[in-house]
Image (cartoon, rainbow, N blue to C red):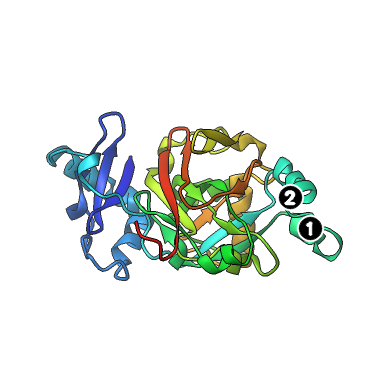
Amino acid sequence: MKLALFDDHRLGAVDPAAATVRDVTEAVPGAGDPDPLGAGWWVRLCRDLPTLRPALSAAGRAAEPRPLTAVKLRAPVLNPGKIIACASNYAAHVAEMRDAVAPEQTSGTGAWLLDFDVFLKAPSSVAGPADTVLLPRATLDAGREIHHESELSLVIGRGGRDIAEEDALGHVFGYLVGLDITERGQGDRSRRKSHDTFTPLGPWITTADEVADPQRLEIELRVGDDVRQRVTTADMVTPVARIIAYASTIMTLEPGDVIMTGAPPGVGPIGPGDTVRVEIGGLGEMKLPVRVTGDPI
């Protein structure tokens, strides 16, 4: 099942082959609240999908299909309690950070930046597949680059603490395409990656039962016609199940939390007028324009 949020945060079942969405909002108690801060129903959906699935399927069969071009797709998460991101999870990305992208940051006392770990991004940085990536003018005026990072992302369904690695994938609600937009330079990762619109997610969530193995997914990112990133998730240093298990030793994972699994090699700068297109096989694609904050659309 592929679940999207569209228009005034309606819940939709997506058929990518037909390019349609069916409104299944009424299948989830409390859903349809246009205020995204009233996201209790979304957490309930993430936690209780096995129970809600029959009603969702029935609602999808009864609803009229609408073309995806006739709706506005929103970020397919609502007010997540946490966005947990992974650093240094592809060996080739670690090498490019050390040798080319940020050698001054990752040498000497900064060498720890090349070690795998997790950090937090602000939930307010979330954007959707129909949104624009906004580059802070002050950052560009200061001469700092802003980079794209394509990432397999997931949403937690069943929460927990100290989750065993062998059980971890059973805690996943679903998978989606993510971008971790990053301001390069000195300073805390969380700050540099938490500007508004710096976490595009979408275009919908593919529920975990439809992803046989999250370590066998192809990721591709283009800026315009230039292929910048092309990788398989098999190349991760720390696989998805181990990420979930590790994160849960630090913080309790809650339904609706988002985990981003780290950037592949090929990161690079984006600027106003660019279009970033990112696709993960079986999960969909996003195509996002880039402009500077305050510039006319």
- Residue 210 placement, left or right of 151: left
Q: Amino acid at mark 2?
A: Met
Amino acid type at mark 1? Thr
Q: Which residue is mark 1?
A: 106
Quadrant where the N terminus is found in the figure: top left
- Name above or below for residue 269 compared with residue 40: above
At numbered mark 2, what does the secondary structure look like: helix, strand or loop? helix
Seen at 70% across and 67% down, the residue is 186
**Residue at left offset 24%, top offset 40%:** 68
Residue 217 in view here? no
Work out which quarter of the rendered image holds the C terminus and state it.
bottom left
Viewer-proximal residue among 293 and 164: 293
Please tell me the numbered disc located at residue 297. none
Relative side of 76 to 109, left or right: left
104 and 118: which one is in front? Answer: 104
Q: Secondary structure at mark 1?
A: loop
Q: Are marks 2 and 1 in contact (CB under 8 Å)?
A: yes
Q: Which residue is mark 2?
A: 97
Judge the density around disc 2: few (<14), some (14-19), many (≥20) Cα neighbours within 10 Å: many
Image location of residue 280, percent across then percent down: 48, 37
Instruction: Work out whether 229 lies above or below 260.
Output: above
Residue 75 in percent (x, y) is at: 36, 54
